[in-house]
Amino acid sequence: MNPSDNKRKVLMINTGGTIGMRASDQGYRVEPGFLEQQMRSMPEIRTPEMPEFEIQDFVPVIDSAQMTPAHWQKIANRISEHYDAFDSFVVLHGTDSMAYTASALAFMLEGLTKTVILTGSQIPLCQTRNDARDNLITSLLLAGSYDIPEVCIFFGAHLFRGCRATKASVYDFDAFQSPNYLPLGEVGTQIRIFEHRMLQRGDAKFNAASLSPARLGTFRLFPGVSAEVLENLLSQPLEGLVLETYGVGTGPTDNKEFLDVLHRACSRGVVIVSCSQCEHGTVSPRDYAAGTALADAGVVSGVDMTIEAAIAKLHYLFNQNLTSEAIRARIGKSLVGELTPIQTN
Ligand code: ASP
């Protein structure tokens, strides 16, 4: 686990994002090759303690607001194609949808035994004052020195499990949080990596799963929510829904129409996952009658998953050739450390 003497080979996949953007009349915009051009004038990334690395740009590079599951597949395939030739992987990515991509890759890269780190920045590398340089250098150092068999996000001062992270600030350099799981690493004057918090991997063979997008939605509850609006959303072709419930998983269950809409959708096979509007803590639906009624209608608990992880997990499970019942049964189980298993005694 300690930094090794042998130089590792890191593949850096540049998908785009602020880190490599250039200022224009319309605000920051992506430009092919611009990041690599900037990096050529950084002698510090070629010092002896840095790993060897190669950069491959996405064609085209994109603002992460344009990400789709097809892009997740492209990243997963790129990692898979180069899995044997490189020791670890750094994925440069915009911050806006980074937590979704990290969550999706965590599920798609089955049997991962190498380090995959997503990073980006709030200010582009080309600006005099920026967070891009530190995020880039530290991600490369981490990927080149430590065995972290997970998809992670490194940003600011923290290394997070990717499927536990969420973008929490448009302003701070420490832009991400992992509300329900402690960081895998902390970076200050020293680099501290917490091995005991990492996933324990079995001996499954590495495989980049294929993912065709499921038809999913999210719906945030609020006082006075319309059952009719929800019913429209739940109608065909929707297959899965993340329902953003109150607190420990409650909703307006005195509204019979609302409850009936949910019940009918669940009976048709729509998988409805309850995730809390509170960032910290877990869904525990049977703590209140207003949650028990949702569970009885067929809504399953997303435990303490982030919305990003719940969406990615639904996409992944809908590609596993499972019945809706089997998908529901897997939602509350940890597949890649995306949730904290409920203690049952
Ligand atoms: N809009 C940018 C993106 O997500 C924001 C960023 O990278 O920070 O690509």
Image: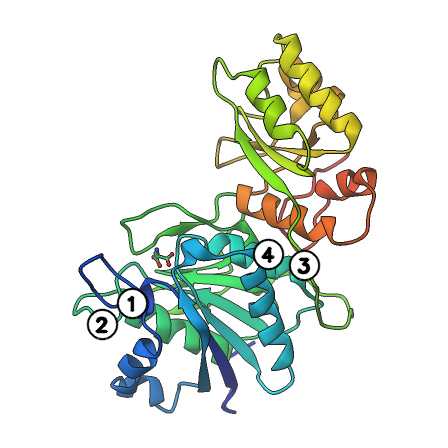
Q: x, y (%) of residue 341?
A: 69, 43
Q: Considering the numbered disc 4 on the image, is that residue within a helix, a strand or a loop?
A: helix
Beta carbon of the mark 1 residue lies under 8 A of ligand 1: yes
Labelled pair 2, 1 in contact (Cβ < 8 Å): yes
Q: Which residue is mark 1?
A: 21
Give the mark nearest the N terminus, 2 or 3.
Answer: 2
Residue 213 shows up from this direction: yes
Badge 1 density bin: few <14, some 14–19, many ≥20, Cα 10 Å: many
> Is 22 above or below relative to 4?
above
Q: x, y (%) of residue 63?
A: 38, 60
Q: Which mark is in front, 2 or 1?
A: 1
Residue at (34% x, 89% y) in the render: 47
Residue 189 shows up from this direction: no
Q: Considering the numbered disc 3 on the image, is that residue within a helix, a strand or a loop?
A: loop
Mark 4–mark 2 distance (CA, rounded to whole Å): 29 Å
Residue at (42% x, 77% y) in the render: 140
Q: Quadrant of ligand 1?
A: bottom left
Give the mark nearest the N terminus, 1 or 3.
Answer: 1
Labelled pair 4, 3 in contact (Cβ < 8 Å): yes
Q: Which residue is mark 3?
A: 211
Q: Which residue is mark 4?
A: 104
Q: Considering the numbered disc 2 on the image, is that residue within a helix, a strand or a loop?
A: loop
Q: Amino acid at mark 1?
A: Met
> Is 293 above or below relative to 284?
above
Mark 2–mark 1 distance (CA, rounded to whole Å): 8 Å
Q: Amino acid at mark 3?
A: Leu
Residue at (49% x, 68% y) in the render: 117
Mark 2–mark 3 distance (CA, rounded to whole Å): 35 Å
Residue 126, label in figure: 2
Badge 3 density bin: few <14, some 14–19, many ≥20, Cα 10 Å: some
Q: x, y (%) of residue 301?
A: 67, 33
